[in-house]
Amino acid sequence: MATTSQQREDGPIRSTMVAVGLAAFGILASQFTVLPALLLDPAVITSPLDASIASRTLLLTLNFVGFVLAGAIYLAATDRGWSYVDLRPPTKQGWLYILAGVLGSIVFYVLVSVIVQLLSLPSAGNSVMTYIGDDQTMVLVMIAIVFFFNAPAEEFLFRNIVQKRLYDAFSRVQAVVIASAIFALIHVVSYAVSESLLATVVPVVVVFGGSLIFGLLYAKTDNLFVPIAAHASFNALQFGLIYIALEYDLEAADSSAALLVDLAAAVPL
C-alpha cells in the first residue's frame, strides 16, 4: 500500500534524524543489556574463545535483547503501544514472499561471491565469528540465536520501528532504502578493525543489499513475520554452510568453497 500525503506528518529531515536516533539508541541499549554476561564472565570480551559456550551464548543473546528494549521504549514513549507492531501469521502469499526473500538473498550472496572472486576484493570477517572460531557446537547455537533473537530483534527495530517511522515522510521504496542504509552503517563497527578500507566497505555493501530485500518484504506485506522468517532462514543457511565447512574442512579442499565460507562468515547477521 502506498503512503499517502496525509500520512506524511513529518518532514524528511526530522524523520531521518529520528530513524538514525532510533538505530543509535538500539546500539546503546545493547551495550547495557550485555552487562550481565560481562560481569559473569569477563573472558567473553578479553578472550572470547576461552569463555564458555554458555557465556558466549548469553552475551550474543542479550546483545539482540537491547534492540527489542530500544524499540519497546520508543513505542511506550510515543504512545504507539504494541498495536503498532505488525506481527501476525502469514497468509499463503506471505509464505511465498518468505520463500522469494530467502531465494533472493541466496542469489544476491552468490553474485557477490562471484564479483569478489573475479575482482579479487578483500572482505573483512564479521566480529561475531570471534565468538565462534572453529567451535561447531557454537555454530549450532548461533542457528538457534538467529531464529529466536537475532532476526526478530533486528527486524522489529529496523523494519517495524525505523522503516515504518520513515513512512511518515517518504514513499515506501525511499523508506526501505534509507532504513537499509542506516542498518548497513551501524555494521561498520563490526568490520572497522580491518586494516583495509575496501575490506570494510565490501561487507557493509553486502548487508545493505540484504537489508533492501528484507525491507521490501516488509513493505509489501506489512507483516513483520515475513522478513523475520526470511532473515532467520538465510542466516541459518549461512551458519549451516560454516558448520559443513568445519565438519568436512572445505576451505582446505577447494578454493571456491573457501571463498563461499569466508563470505558466509563475513555477511552480517
Image (cartoon, grey):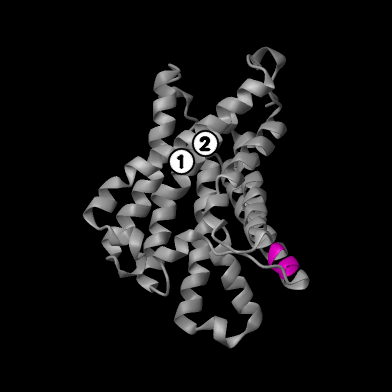
Image point 63% across, 65% down: which residue?
A: 123
The answer to whether 132 is drawn above or below residue 18 in the figure is below
Give the Cα distance between marks 2 and 1. 6 Å
What's the residue type where badge 2 is placed?
Answer: Ala
Left/right of residue 28 with respect to residue 14 in the rendered view:
left
Which residue lies under the disc numbered 2? 23
User: Can residue 6 be seen from the camera position used here?
Assistant: yes
Prevailing secondary structure of the magenta residues: helix
> As rendered, which of 20 and 67 lies closer to the eye?
20
Q: Residue 98 or 137: which is nearer the viewer?
A: 137
Residue 227 is situated, as x and y percent measured from the top left of the image, at 55, 44
Specify the farthest residue to the left.
Answer: 40
Q: Furthest residue to the right?
A: 119
Residue at 71%, 32% in the rendered image: 174
Residue lying at 64% horizontally and 63% vertically, measured from the top left:
196
Left/right of residue 5 with respect to residue 154 in the rendered view: right
Q: Where is residue 209 drawn, in percent x and y?
A: 67, 50
Q: Magenta includes 187?
A: no
Which mark is on residue 27?
Answer: 1
